[in-house]
Amino acid sequence: MMNNIFKGKLFGLVVPLIAIGFGFLAGAVIMLISGNNPINGYVALVQGVFGDTYYFGETLQRMTPLIFSGLAVAFAFRTGLLNIGVEGQLIVGWFVSVLVGITIEAPMIIHLPLAILAGALAGALWGFVPGVLKARFQVHEVIVTIMMNYIAMHVVNHFIRNYMLESGQRTAFINDTASLSSDYLSTLTNFSRLHWGFLIAIAACVVMWFILWKTKKGFELRSVGYNKHASSYAGMSVNMNIILSMSVSGAFAGAGGAMVGLGTYNYANILPSFTNLGFDGIAVALLGSSTSIGIFLSAFLFGGLKEGANNMQGQAGVAPELVEIIIALIIFFVASSYLIRWIYSRVQSNKEGK
Amino acid sequence: MKKRFMMLMSSVLAAGTLLAACGEGDEDTTPVNDGGNNNENEAAEGNNEAAEDGEGFSSKMVTDVGGVDDRSFNESAWAGLTEFGEDYPDVEVDYIQSNDASDYAPNLNRLAREGTDLTFAIGFLMLDDIKTVAEQSPDQNFALVDDVATGEDDEPIDNIANLTFAEHEGSFLVGVVAAMHTETNQVGFIGGVESPLIKKFENGFKAGVKYVDSDIDIAVQYAQDFNDASRGQQIADTMYGNGADIIYHAAGGTGNGLFTEAVDRAQGGENVWAIGVDQDQALTEGEWEEGNVILTSMVKRVDQAVYQVSEDTMNGNFPGGEIIEFGLEDEGVGIAETRDNVSDEAIEAVEEYQQMIIDGEIEVPQTDEEYEEFEGEL
Amino acid sequence: MEYVIEMNNIRKEFPGIVANDNITLQVKQGEIHALLGENGAGKSTLMNVLFGLYQPEKGEIKVRGKKVDVTDPNVANNLGIGMVHQHFMLVQNFTVTENIILGSEPTNKGTIDHRKAAKDVADISDQYGLRVDPKAKIEEISVGMQQRVEILKTLYRGADILIFDEPTAALTPQEIKELIQIMKNLIKEGKSIILITHKLKEIMQVCDRCTVIRRGKGIGTVNVADSTENSLAEMMVGREVSFEVEKGAAKPKDNVLSIKDLHVEDARGVSVVNGLNLDIRAGEIVGVAGVDGNGQTELIEAVTGLRQAKSGTINVSGQDVTSFKPRKVTEAGVGHIPQDRHKHGLVLEFTVGENILLQTYYQQPFTKNGVLNYPKMYEKARKLIEEYDVRTPNEKTLARSLSGGNQQKAIIAREVDRSPDLLIAAQPTRGLDVGAIEFIHKKLIEERDKGRAVMLVSLELDEVLNVSDRIAVIYEGEIVAIVDADKTDEKELGLLMAGGKREEGEPI
């Protein structure tokens, strides 16, 4: 009863916004303590995103894989699964799409979709394994996916190092027919690395929304996510849905990897450590309340923060770590949305009391 | 979020460590002046007044993830730039730190667009990005540390200066030290991630050992990780257990495990040694109650390279399209200043061989093929 | 007359709702005072105010004539107010004594004085005839015994005003009888009791006076002796209520459900259904009566395909469904109103409409080529909402925000609308108020009269007796007796449920 107003759509928007606000506020305090002017810092941050079409293009480029990893996390989450393995799924997707991009010769109309699809399939496979283990043997997906991340990184590194090393730490460039790079978008944004993948990411948001909210399968996935008991009572196969959910989630992640491989870099390289694009996806999904539009917006926020951070140090002399701290604080406040709800309800009841 | 940052930072930092060198030691607090002894810098000396004319000149760098306080590579480069800024007060020096690999390109671009006269990319990881940016800003000057940027025609790019180091030569010298100190006639090498760069360390070291005594056995193992100290310790344990008494590492953070194992064994009364890399590691690592297990270290002077190229560029001699290798001759690499554990004979030998390398009497191998050839000729 | 508790003109608001509006409750020393109201009427809120969990906006509380400010449960404890919660707050793998002393352990030089504690607990237990073994672990004792531990807990803390929150919900008839005796003992020892309930029969049995609240408003306080069940129900619901379930005689036809020698294991692999046989015919309601935990749950799960039977056969309308998956069982003509509607019946975060379509969403016209047709789904939902009188703002309201009765109606709409040959209703009225119970019973009988076979599994003997045509008593996984509902009574059923044999010695 009393919770009704806190469950409204509006409140779903309010919590992340308050969290972001608190995050920035705390960031300002930290800047003050460390002897920086927070206003200058934030001005530099905003200019670092919007100040030049190049920066803006780079921001969009950065958010592209984040959208995919956010969608991947959210998709599994809707089925009640915590896919920590987006990182690994993204890495294999990156690698396999580049592999297809290098080894196959075909006209673009076949080659490019094939490469993206290959990446998505690789990611799907990487999600399928923990899905099956969860469904068949009740092995917790968090443990398996974490392990799968390491397997992904080391296996990919092994293949690149031993079979595909071209220069330094990377493979050869992919064939142009498999590349998402766009001279048009790049010129439009003053030589940024913005590529067609950005549009694909937007399409992916729509796809996820459609699957979850408009299809029979999506209905089942959400139902299982909310209440697997009632779902099995209603005749749905919980196990099949778990496997499906992890696979589709992995496919989103793998496609995200393909965006990085085919769009941003046009190659794959030996990873000294995780890309973190997958881990950031958890934060993106959380901040975006696992909705398509929310994920798009929060991916923009995270991409912008990362891009603008460089300008903060260049222009305002703020340590780049600070931006990491702000991001961490935002996630902290989103995660403790309970706290925000509580404060909010306190304020509300005070108002009504008077 | 924090974790991912730390993870990225530490791992790339580790990679950086390999390629880097800090200031050499107590004696060497003014490395730039030291560098002034060689002929390249004579021009610079002569142009000291020209520095005043060089007002408005700016030299900036994009760091790797470690940042300028990574006690390594980036720090060393920044020390070189700072030094340069102090010597020529009208010059503007600055840096931008990258938080992850995707920051390289925008950061390089940022500096280029600001009109920076010379933009350094610190680390071979920025190879592809600097190529793209240099192509987009053809009027700007760039310098890449630790790798060679070539265009599609395999020719160097005109507005990029390539700064590399003769790690194999430095490694040769520590190989000599190892060969002269081993009592078991067995030594070891631990590599980080296998790559052409680390191969230079390995082959140089092996060549140095074999040159002194071709009967010495050399164990080689790669951890395939720059940041896994426990793996390093495990490998060191195996190597020492198999009879090696001196191990050289080129493995960044992984190498810290080597020092741990060496200290453990030294405390257990065994006579084992470790050889550090990039900087004079005896200053920070390997300490135990009765001394230090670090025999010597192979150091690499990024600061000098950065200083020199900045100075040359300011004086209108930007070495664009050139590949500058900083070797023994320029004191770009060498053995560390801390030599308490090294015998006089070994030092004499090192000096002798150093001269032979400079004179071209010894050609130190870099790749596996070159090493095989080298070994065959012994 | 001295009141031990006076709650005068209490008003408690939550954002958007007035939970208690000007309610007065006065409890006399040494009486059992009933607090009666439908679910959501505001009983719990009022008691939480008394217990210090909520602060009232208006009104005053007096304990033993003195005005007090109950700011938190500790204050209530100190005032001698104790609460026996509906959901026991016990640590499963602690002993009775450990649970009782938890939070107020007697210490001896810093260590817990277990001996003294055990002795104190035993003393109190004897004094009130609670017969609790202080050394038993909670996980090893029955639900009724656990409740007595809860009572002991409050007594141990020196409570002399005890609040019982729906204490009989989880008890067997025998345990209810014992509980009533315990309450009477407590009164004899000078305690006062507030009994929160919506069961009129219990009030008539034990209470002295009764305060009725409806939709947050105090309706009044009456002497139980001067009231009837009907008059109380009318006060509670606000209209006349009939308790007699009106039904004609059953006209049973052919067998719809036929279970032969069924063996089922529970999740731990223990065999809990042991060679069970049961037939249910079209046009009759068969009540399955039994003490909780005698295999009812596993029986239902086996029939509905949720649990694989070990051996035996289950036949529905001539089709062997023993190894069917739930969806195929559903399609074979079985409807299931699950026992736990929140856990098994509804997806609470789904809308009412989505929940109503939870069994049929995949069929034409709701799904076409894998894509849902929401307009069609909601159109159907609207129709059923109207037909089954589900009180909801609209079909797009979240199921969570509905009252229990309306949630149950939504489930019934879903299951009954499919016209299943066999309708299984497990505890269909648990926790519901009189009005909703009435509706649900009527629906079950309607379905019977349409020629469906109905299996009613319930722990409430009243319900089984009133609604069923035949009653099958389940004991340790077997049907030990099948009796005609109008030829038996509560006493006989209670005996059978406890494993006793039929006195009359009639063949079953």
Image: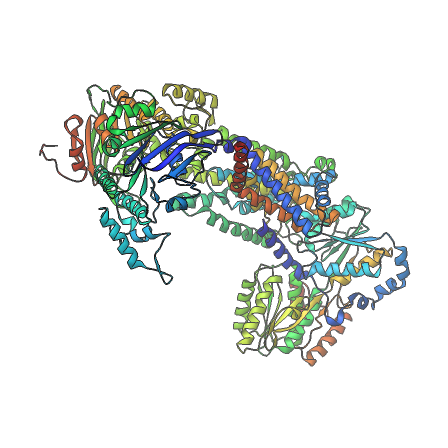
Q: Nearer the viewer, residue A73 or A243?
A: A73
Q: In this view, does C476 lie above or below C412?
A: below
**x 78%, y 45%: residue:** B113
Tell me where residue A190 sits by quadrant. Answer: top right
Q: In this view, does B216 lie above or below C257?
A: below
Residue found farthest to the front: C1
In the figure, is residue A207 to the left or right of C334?
right
Q: Picture coordinates of residue B245 (x, y %)?
A: 58, 75
Q: Picture coordinates of residue A228 (x, y %)?
A: 40, 37
In the figure, is residue C347 to the left or right of A117?
left
Q: Nearer the viewer, residue C291 or C418?
A: C291
Q: Can residue B161 be seen in this view?
A: yes
**x 70%, y 47%: residue:** A310
Q: Is residue B79 above or below residue C503?
A: below
Q: Picture coordinates of residue C239 (x, y %)?
A: 32, 20
Tell me where residue B76 sits by quadrant. Answer: bottom right
Q: Which of B246 and A212 is in front in this view?
A: A212
Q: Can residue A118 be seen in this view?
A: no
Q: Nearer the viewer, residue C1 or A136?
A: C1
Q: Picture coordinates of residue A275 (x, y %)?
A: 60, 49
Residue found farthest to the left: C505
